[in-house]
Each structure stands twice: as structure tokens, then as C-alpha cells.
């Protein structure tokens, strides 16, 4: 155990330097890069792609207790490669780390796990699906039917996920462009999970129900060298429509944008740079940073003009790679709930 921890501590500064959010714009020599026209292969593509540098299985959930109290849950497993290959044991260059959080209007509880590939401590298998790190896991007989668990020092959760709609693909059939220079990722989502389960919190256990959104994305250089972070929105409207949109902030103060409109039946419409807009309305000081926690969001082609507000402005993920992530409420032309992630504010 001591040797394992020591090895990870030696590797972690390199990983954070190379794979911190701004570092995702660095060159990725030797790794595969996304290209248009990729034909997804399921269930295989639910599993890992070790020839790419960075990959994640990223779930966020908007939940509610029996008394109507809102909760947010995050579960993310990241794979980050030091080289585009896999090996047995400690020679494996794949690094795994995971983040978990529970957010309420007044608290934000977080935990982190770090693991080295090749020794069974973490990994993903496609069928039956299982993503795990230590005793955290998301697994089930298929990608559409899973159980999700995680625990920290002051919280835990145990949730059942059941997909009620299809997978959706962002950009050009899953080829998601991230910059004017052409950086891109492969990106699809399962935004239709129905959720039931239990949160274990400092004040006791809470039975919850709600909806979850799972993002799958992999790339090797998803940012351009002039981009420092992103503001990502996943919005589920009471009408049944959904909207994914992001801004990638650039050094000159402008941003590259992209969006996907998801109809209730899963039909998608992709929107290019400039069609989706988001402007900060209120800033909040948290953990020594100033971050926007209330936004004006517009997608004029769909008559979307809403205010997106953080359920808890203090939802800062103060982990090895720090960022803001938390549930949001939606008001204006559309109502609903969603999630907001903001990186590059470290």
C-alpha cells in the first residue's frame, strides 16, 4: 500500500500538469485523435479507448427527497494516459481518478479517488458494463440498467439508474468540434436515466428520485492552445426538451460555442459556433476564486431565453484538479433543472 501511494504521488504532479483543464490544449504526440465519420460500435465504445489521452464517464443527477428538497449528485471516472498503450501491472501508463459529490442548497460534499491502471484497482468493461475505482462503481447488466455507488468521509450514495430514452450524439454524429482550429472529441450522452435510491448524509439517510445525465467523451487534445477552460450546461426542461451547450473560453476574451438540442423523443439538432450564447449575470467568491453562478442562456433558434442559477453557489470541487460543478434551476422562456460545470477558474 505504501509503495502504491508513493508511486501515485510521484506521477500525480505530472498528470495534473499535463491533464489539468488548460493542459488539455497541449500537443498529444503519439496518441490517436478524433476524426469525422467515426462509426460508433456498441457496447464496445462504452468501454475505454487507451490510444486516446483523456476519457471520462461523467454522470450528474437532479434528485428530490419526499419532502421536495432538491439534491444534486455527481459521479465521474476519468482515464488519463501517460502513453497510448496498456501494460500489465505497474508498467501500465493509464492513470484513473474519480470525483463524487452531493450538493444541497446549503452543503457541498466531495471526495476523490486516484488509481494506477494495470493492477485491477480501477477500470471499465463494456459488457456487462462496469466502471469502478476502489469501492466506487457504476455497473449493471447493460449501459441502460446500472447501480451507482460512491462514498466520502461525510456522505455516500447508492442509486439505481434505468434509461428511458436513446443515446444522443453531439456535433456531427458524435464528432464534437471544440475550436476554430479543429480540435475535437468523440462525444455522446445518455440523458434519460430515471433514478431511485438513497443518499447518506451527515443528518441521516434520504430516499430520493429524479433524473440523471451521463456523458461519454474521449479525445487527445480537446482544447486549442489559446483555450483555458469551459462553461458547460446540461439543461432538462419541463417540456421534455433538453439542451447541451458549452463555451470554450479563449485568451482574447471571446469563446467558441457549441450546442445540441434534444427533442423529447431523442431527435437531435446540432448547433455550430455562435448559435448558443451564455453571459454571466452574477459572480460569487468561493475558495478564493470568483466564478459566475447565475447565467443568461439563449438559443434563439429554439426561442430559449432563460436564467440559469446555481442551487448552491459554493459547489466548488476543491480537488487535485479544481473546478466548479453543481445543480442549477432554470427560469424564463423555459423552466426546469440541470447541471453546470465551469473549469479553468483555478
Image: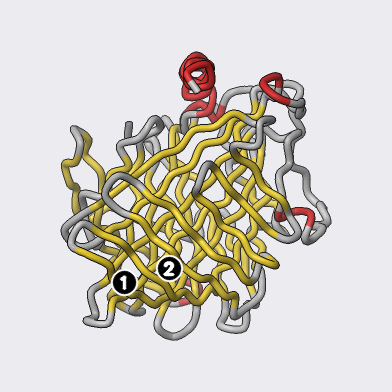
Label at residue 39 = none
Q: Is residue 147 left or right of residue 237?
A: right
Marks 1 and 2, the one that precedes in the sequence: 2
Q: How many marks?
A: 2
Indicate the secondary structure of the residue bearing disc 2: strand
Q: Position of residue 31 (x, y in %)?
A: 74, 28
The x, y position of residue 314, in whole percent, is 21, 49
* Viewer-proximal residue among 105 and 265: 105
Label 1, secondary structure: give it: strand
Determine whether label 1 and label 2 are within 8 Å by CB.
yes
* Relative vertical location of residue 196 with respect to residue 187 in this rendering, above or below: below
Task: Name the one closer to the observer, 39 or 223.
Answer: 39
Disc 2 designates what residue? 235
Mark 2 nearby-residue class (10 Å; few <14, some 14–19, many ≥20): many
Image position of 126 with respect to 322: above or below = below
Query: What residue is shown with label 1?
Result: 330
Amino acid at each position: 500500500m505504501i509503495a502504491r501511494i508513493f508511486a501515485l504521488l510521484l506521477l500525480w504532479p505530472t498528470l495534473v500538469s499535463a491533464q489539468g483543464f488548460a493542459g488539455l490544449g497541449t500537443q498529444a504526440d503519439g496518441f490517436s485523435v478524433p476524426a469525422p465519420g467515426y462509426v460508433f460500435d456498441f457496447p464496445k465504445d462504452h468501454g475505454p479507448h487507451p490510444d486516446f489521452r483523456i476519457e471520462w464517464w461523467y454522470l450528474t443527477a437532479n434528485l428530490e427527497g419526499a419532502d421536495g428538497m432538491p439534491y444534486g449528485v455527481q459521479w465521474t471516472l476519468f482515464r488519463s494516459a501517460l502513453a497510448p498503450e496498456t501494460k500489465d501491472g505497474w508498467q501500465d501508463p493509464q492513470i484513473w481518478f474519480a470525483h463524487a459529490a452531493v450538493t444541497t442548497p446549503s452543503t457541498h460534499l466531495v471526495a476523490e479517488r486516484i488509481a494506477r491502471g494495470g493492477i485491477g484497482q480501477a477500470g471499465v468493461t463494456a459488457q456487462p458494463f462496469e466502471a469502478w475505482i476502489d469501492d466506487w462503481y457504476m455497473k449493471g447488466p447493460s449501459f441502460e440498467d446500472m447501480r451507482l455507488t460512491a462514498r466520502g468521509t461525510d456522505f455516500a450514495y447508492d442509486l439505481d439508474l434505468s434509461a428511458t430514452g436513446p443515446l444522443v450524439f453531439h456535433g456531427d454524429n458524435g464528432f464534437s468540434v471544440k475550436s476554430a482550429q479543429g480540435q475535437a472529441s468523440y462525444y455522446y450522452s445518455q440523458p434519460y436515466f430515471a433514478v431511485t435510491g438513497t443518499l447518506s448524509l451527515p443528518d441521516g439517510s434520504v430516499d430520493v428520485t429524479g433524473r440523471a445525465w451521463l456523458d461519454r467523451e474521449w479525445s487527445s487534445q480537446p482544447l486549442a492552445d489559446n483555450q483555458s477552460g469551459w462553461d458547460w450546461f446540461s439543461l432538462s426542461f419541463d417540456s421534455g426538451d433538453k439542451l447541451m451547450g458549452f463555451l470554450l473560453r479563449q485568451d482574447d476574451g471571446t469563446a467558441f460555442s457549441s450546442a445540441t438540442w434534444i427533442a423529447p423523443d431523442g431527435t437531435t439538432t446540432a448547433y455550430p459556433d455562435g448559435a448558443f450564447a451564455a453571459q454571466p449575470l452574477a459572480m460569487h467568491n468561493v475558495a478564493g476564486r470568483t466564478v459566475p453562478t447565475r447565467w443568461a442562456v439563449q438559443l434563439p433558434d429554439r426561442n430559449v431565453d432563460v436564467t440559469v442559477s446555481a442551487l448552491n453557489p459554493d459547489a466548488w470541487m476543491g480537488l487535485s484538479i479544481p473546478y466548479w460543478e453543481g445543480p442549477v434551476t432554470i427560469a424564463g422562456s423555459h423552466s426546469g433543472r440541470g447541471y453546470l460545470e465551469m473549469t479553468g477558474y483555478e
